[in-house]
Amino acid sequence: MMHTRVGWHVEMEFMEDDQHTRAVALVRLPDGTEVRAHGAASRHRSDTNQPRVGEEIAGARALNELAMQLLTKAHEEIDQASGRTSHPIHV
């Protein structure tokens, strides 16, 4: 049996100011499709300024949204190939 190795590279980009962090996650799939998602985090004014924490939260939210978009894409492809509605894939 032959196994195929496939790799995905996810790119993350952050935009920050003193109180807000925004993240964009992008994955390019082998079929040429690009899936992009966004996440955000806000720092409460009483919290210390820790940009890394904002990046982690905004990045995690972007990756979570990316995962949901990939699950939706997979469902649509299953439905098209099978001609019926697929069962939900729970995370």
Image (tube, rainbow, N blue to C red):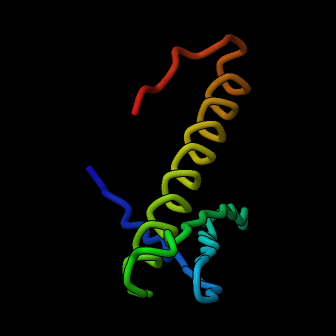
Residue lying farthest to the front in this orientation: 46
Q: Position of residue 33 (x, y in %)?
A: 72, 62
* Residue in the image at 68% along x and 26% along y: 81
Figure check: 68 above or below 35: above
Residue lying farthest to the left in this orientation: 1
Q: Position of residue 84 (x, y in %)?
A: 68, 11
Closer to the camera in the image, 79 or 11: 11
Q: Is residue 70 left or right of residue 36?
A: left
Residue lying farthest to the top in this orientation: 84
**Quadrant of the rendered structure where residue 5 is?**
bottom left
Q: Position of residue 30 (x, y in %)?
A: 60, 66
Q: Position of residue 20 (x, y in %)?
A: 61, 76
* Residue in the image at 66% along x and 41% along y: 73
Q: Is residue 21 left or right of residue 83?
A: left
Q: How many marks?
A: 0
Q: Is residue 46 left or right of residue 70?
A: left
Closer to the camera in the image, 67 or 13: 13
* Residue in the image at 46% along x and 26% along y: 89
Q: Is residue 57 left or right of residue 35?
A: left
- Quarter of the image that includes the C terminus: top left
**Quadrant of the rendered structure where residue 62 is?**
bottom right
Closer to the camera in the image, 19 or 46: 46
* Residue in the image at 59% along x and 69% along y: 27
**Quadrant of the rendered structure where residue 51 is?**
bottom left
